Image (tube, helix red, strand yellow):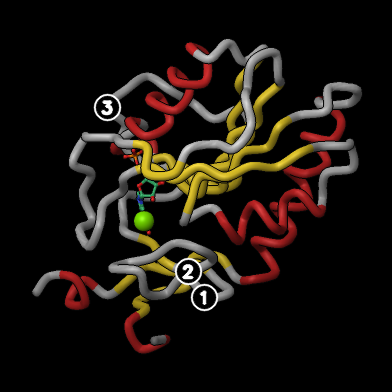
Amino acid sequence: MQNDIQEVLYSEQQIQDKVKEMGELISRDFEGRNPLVICVLKGAFIFMADLVKQITVPLEIDFMAVSSYGASTKSSGVVKIIKDLDVPVEGRHILIVEDIIDSGLTLSYLIDVLERRNALSVTVAALFDKPARRTVDLDADYKGFVIPDAFVVGYGLDYGEKYRNLPFVGILKSEVYSH
Ligand code: XMP
Ligand code: MG
């Protein structure tokens, strides 16, 4: 598995430090707001688990799954809810936890859905941001790392469902997905 990685972008320690920093900011901003924290499956599952441990205000969690790239590295542009939330969002302060913002299509769709369901506020925490590939005007409220336009795996991020369990984040060798 490690042989398929061209370069480690962020080590386990660098990620932990960043997540702690993000958790501190979120704790400060969400004081007294009891947010509903939504993990966007599957890519954000590790980030979500680490992030909520760094948030000191009372919160609730829920999970949502939307259509993703499948085994491809490019978005189809079509977003579909595969698993919906278990709880209503009406009147709630929502914090969406996302692994990476690429085109921005997934998030803009999710934000739209939650706003139409009358969430009180919708805020986004994304561990990675690839601004070079954005097709919709969207930015995360809390952002971990801004990364170059390369396909990354590890720390929850996959290619064809593999590599999610790597504790670091790296760039996949192009020969791994070019054939
Ligand atoms: P959009 O384009 O909608 O995409 O912003 C967001 C989703 O695309 C996936 N994605 C990646 N997954 N390595 C991955 O493993 C990447 O470099 C990458 N770029 C985008 C991811 O699931 C995210 O939720
Ligand atoms: Mg994925």
From this viewpoint, is residue 143 visible? no
- Identified at 32% across, 59% down, the residue is 151
Q: Which mark is residue 135?
A: 3
Quadrant of the picture in which ligand 2 is shown: bottom left
Helix, strand or loop at mark 2: loop
Label 1: element kind:
loop
Viewport quadrant of the N terminus: bottom left
Q: Are marks 3 and 2 in contact (CB under 8 Å)?
A: no
The amino acid sitting under disc 2 is Gly
Q: Residue at 55% of width from left, 36% of height from top?
A: 85
Q: Which residue is mark 2?
A: 154
Q: In x, y percent, where is residue 91? A: 70, 13
N-term-proximal mark, 2 vs 1 = 2
Comparing marks 3 and 1, which lies closer to the viewer?
A: 1
Q: Of residues 112 and 176, which is closer to you in this image?
A: 112
Q: Which residue is mark 1?
A: 165
